[in-house]
Amino acid sequence: MNAVSPARTFAAQARFDTVVAEAFAATRTTRHARDRLIARLHRGAYDGLLLRQAEGFSALPEASERRAALNAIDFAFEPLVLGSLSVAQADAYFAGIEAVLRVGPAEGLYRPGPLWLDTVHHACVFSVLYRMAAFLKARRGIGTVVLLHQGLRPEPRLGLAANVLARMHGVALHLLPLRGHWFAELARRATPDLAVFSLCDMPREALGPIPARRLRARLDLHAGPGLRRGVETVSGSEVFARRLGAAHLVLDYPSRDRIRVRPHDGGPALCPVEDWVFWPALVARGRPDTAPEA
């Protein structure tokens, strides 16, 4: 899992998340930067970079397009303010997701052995994974969670989540970058009270050359009737979960207000497009007459 990098990681073009990250990086007054970004968004300054420019989403309602942009702004803003919270405040902040997203069907959580949960970069992914880890501790006695991540850049939310989970819920969260002999290290931790969280929706453009053992996967992005787009992603979860002897599950988002947990069946994960962190990667280069100001 990674914060959105100011560098143009996926393509040499203007992208909305790049504009947002650079705006926050250019000032210490992050609250004012957020306010300025939102004001400019509502004035139409970023229209050429927004979601209706993406193939398949030209009919997206304007309100949904604006919501996607606000999600991108707040995803970048979140780590800048979380560090100021106490442990109790951070726990309450993460728990607040339960008022926004309800858990629908939850199948397979009580399968024996370690659990392997694939999920996606939802705008609220840190809160969702935090609450899922606390839930698994309370209901399954799972006290160790390993989060697999690309390790492209530091992500302060992960350190905060690890600290608060340990102090408030007795859960040990380990961050394991997908480098070197990572699977051997993971296998050494494999016990029945282990849960592995894997973010398996990285667009192929984000990874450059794809290792031979990384398999293709699919993510279905949806935004109401007739508005749906499949995205090819890269994931070796099916192979690695089987090698680990883990029950392989998927945590995804069939609607904007619902989380689903289900056994992995090879089908695509679901996520509302406006809630997917990487939606700016879908958008073509902004038109010259709508390029954002510095």
Image (spheres, helix red, strand yellow):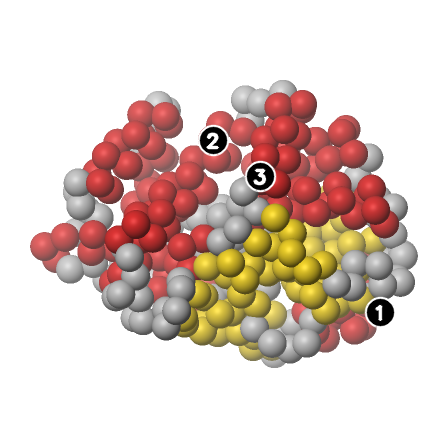
Q: Which mark is residue 99?
A: 3
Mark 1 to mark 3: distance in Å? 34 Å
The answer to whether any part of residue 267 appears in the image is yes
Residue at which label 1 appears: 245
User: Residue 139 location, x and y as percent?
Assistant: 83, 46
Kindly identify the amino acid type of the residue bearing the numbered disc 1. Answer: Gly
Q: In front here: 189 or 55?
A: 55
Residue identifier under label 2: 80
Asked which secondary structure carries label 1, the reply is loop
Image spot of residue 86 (x, y percent) = 63, 21
Q: Is residue 177 left or right of residue 155?
A: right
Residue in the picture at 45% in, 42% down: 75
Question: What is the secondary structure assignment of the residue under circle 3?
Answer: helix
Q: Earlier in the sequence, mark 1 or mark 3?
A: 3
Q: Position of residue 162 (x, y in %)?
A: 70, 37
Along the viewing direction, whichever of 64 and 210 lies nearer the viewer: 64
Of badges 1 and 3, nearer the viewer stands 3
